[in-house]
Amino acid sequence: MKKLSHVNNEGDVQMVDVTAKTNTIRKAKARGIVQMDSDTLKLIEKGQIAKGNVLTTAKIAGIMAAKKTGELIPLCHPLELTGIDLKLSIDPESSQIIIVSEVQTAGKTGVEMEALTAVSIAALTIYDMCKAVNKKIMIGDIMLLEKSGGKSGTFIRNK
């Protein structure tokens, strides 16, 4: 059985000590889906949501969230991120917004949690901005798509 890295020999939680690890380029890509009715999606497209520009606000929220991941997730290391990008695209046929984040750093630990946090908070921001119009909005399919760098190497999700 593989030992859990966040549990010490006494069974207590711990933040992993990465002091001896070497810096490498770390990248992660995550995705999430925000599903809604077509009327709400049209309001977003037309810029008619009362709280303002939904996609721009969600993108900024996701970027801010990635930078704060170490404060939000108890055992995550605070990281100096060197790149964060979020793309939010509207898919009118399936009545959804697809959020994709890409995060990178040159560091001792990966950025998967930062990429996932960016997507999650961007999705929650969309919900918050549109809840007055539609409380049935669904957030889902949040997942890691890719990661590279570090001892565990590259991971690419087979869709």
Image: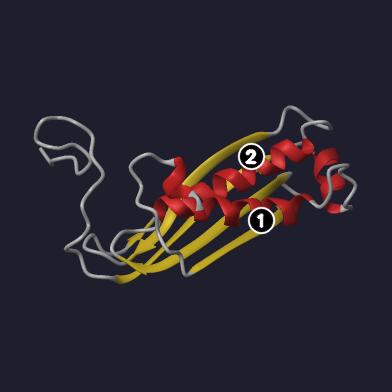
Where in the figure is residue 84, as x and y percent of width and height?
A: 53, 64
Which secondary structure lies at badge 2?
A: helix
Residue at 20% across / 52% down in the picture?
17
Q: Please determine whether, in this image, residue 42 is positioned above or below residue 154.
A: above
Q: Quadrant of residue 108?
A: bottom left
**Tag 1 residue:** 59
Viewer-closest of 3 and 17: 17
Q: Is residue 50 left or right of residue 21?
A: right
Where in the figure is residue 77, as x and y percent of width and height?
A: 35, 51
The answer, for residue 31, to whether it is visible in the render is: no
- Residue with the most extreme top position: 135
**Tag 2 residue:** 124
Q: Residues within 10 Å of mark 1 (few under 14, many from 20)?
A: many
Which secondary structure lies at badge 1?
A: helix
Q: Quadrant of residue 18?
A: bottom left
Q: In the rendered structure, which disc, 2 or 1, sits on the residue that comes first in sequence?
A: 1
Q: Is residue 132 left or right of residue 143?
A: right
Residue at 15% across / 30% down in the picture?
11
Where in the figure is residue 25, as x and y percent of width and height?
A: 35, 72
Describe the colour scheme in one phrase: secondary structure
Q: Please determine whether, in this image, residue 155 is positioned above or below residue 105.
A: above
Residue at 42% across / 64% down in the picture?
80
Q: Please determine whether, in this image, residue 13 is positioned above or below residue 103.
A: above
Viewer-closest of 152 and 58: 58
Q: Is residue 109 left or right of residue 113?
A: left
Label 2 to label 1, Cα distance in Å? 11 Å
